[in-house]
Image: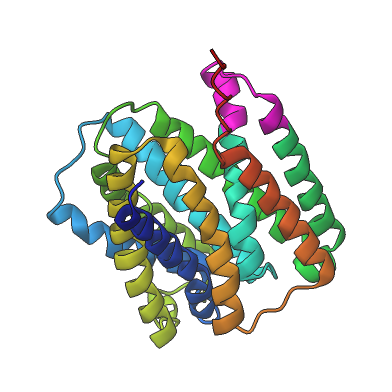
Amino acid sequence: MNRRDALLAVLAALIWGGTYPFSALALQDTPPMFFTALRFSCAACFILIVPRPRIPVLKLLLLGLFLGAALFALTFIAMTQGLSASLASVLVHVQAFFTILISMVVFGERMNRRQLLALLITGAGITVLAVDRGQAGSAVALLLIMLAALSGGIGNNIMKSLGQTDMFRVSVWMTAVPPLPLFALSYALEGDGTVSGLIDTITWPTIIALAYSSVLATIVVFAIWGRLLVAYSSAAVAPFFLLVPVFAVALSAIILGETLSAMQITGGVLVFAGLALALLPARKPPLPVT
């Protein structure tokens, strides 16, 4: 990967990492499902200028539900249940392992020894966080973020089943799916049961977070990732995803003043180490000497 594209990948990871602290600020006033619905409503405006991808409607709907509605709504609900933005950004990336496990069942792929070791290390990290749930967040919050990661793993495999297609178009058009079911759930479960009550929860931090997440973190980031995935192999691009939780933790400390306990740091490092081991490309064996 040339220097320019590497910098673009780092920029995409930085922008994506920033969604966690900005969303945490918005969630102080705005209910999680309502905020998620608003986020995807803003992003869905771009379907007016981006052509529809040539994929089955059912798969587009499923992508919107799993990679959109469920993934983000569950993550944001977990953040309102005591899970910090820092830990949420690390734990939601456990979807990489759910993606591998589901691929084994659906596509008959095999888990190699390195992936198994990575899974065990990540499991140890989650166990540490579960033991420290009094500080890391409630047991409910940890369960919700794991369900979010599972949803992401399902969505990733649906995306994988599409084969060669324009992923940028897919990423834009799937944003049109989450708003309707999430608005309905939010109306039924959040606020005082009135539309005006939900609207009243929209504050300036909410508006800033929506602008950031819908334009920068959705359209710009997916455009960059899509360009890189076309130009380079997945093995070359995937390691840059590991920068997302790194930037998220750093920005959460700067913007939110978050601090982590010793056990949270230990658990987070173990999870991150497992992800790195799973995503970083393996070394090629040396060529035989002739």
Please indicate, yes or no, whether residue 240 appears anywhere in the rendered image. yes
Residue 125: x %, y % from top left: 78, 51
Q: Is residue 272 above or below residue 154?
A: below
Instruction: Read off the magenta span.
Output: 100-116
Q: Is residue 104 left or right of residue 40?
A: right
Magenta stretch: dominant SS?
helix
Residue depicted at x 58% and y 33%: 282
Residue depicted at x 51% and y 47%: 239
Q: Is residue 78 above or below residue 105?
A: below
Question: Residue 142's image quarter?
Answer: bottom right
Please indicate, yes or no, whether residue 187 appears anywhere in the rendered image. no
Q: Is residue 33 above or below residue 48?
A: below
The residue most toward the bottom is: 204
Question: Residue 216's image quarter?
Answer: bottom left
Q: Is residue 120 left or right of residue 8?
A: right
Color theme of the render: rainbow
Judging depth in this view, the residue of 125 and 145 nearest the camera is 125
The residue most toward the front is: 290
The residue most toward the top is: 290
Q: Is residue 31 above or below residue 51?
A: below
Residue 247: x %, y % from top left: 53, 67
Judging depth in this view, the residue of 186 and 144 nearest the camera is 144
How many callouts does the rendering have?
0
Residue depicted at x 52% and y 44%: 152
Q: Is residue 170 left or right of residue 189?
A: left
Residue 185: x %, y % from top left: 48, 58
Judging depth in this view, the residue of 252 and 62 nearest the camera is 252
Residue 50 among those drawn in magenta: no
Residue 88: x %, y % from top left: 62, 62
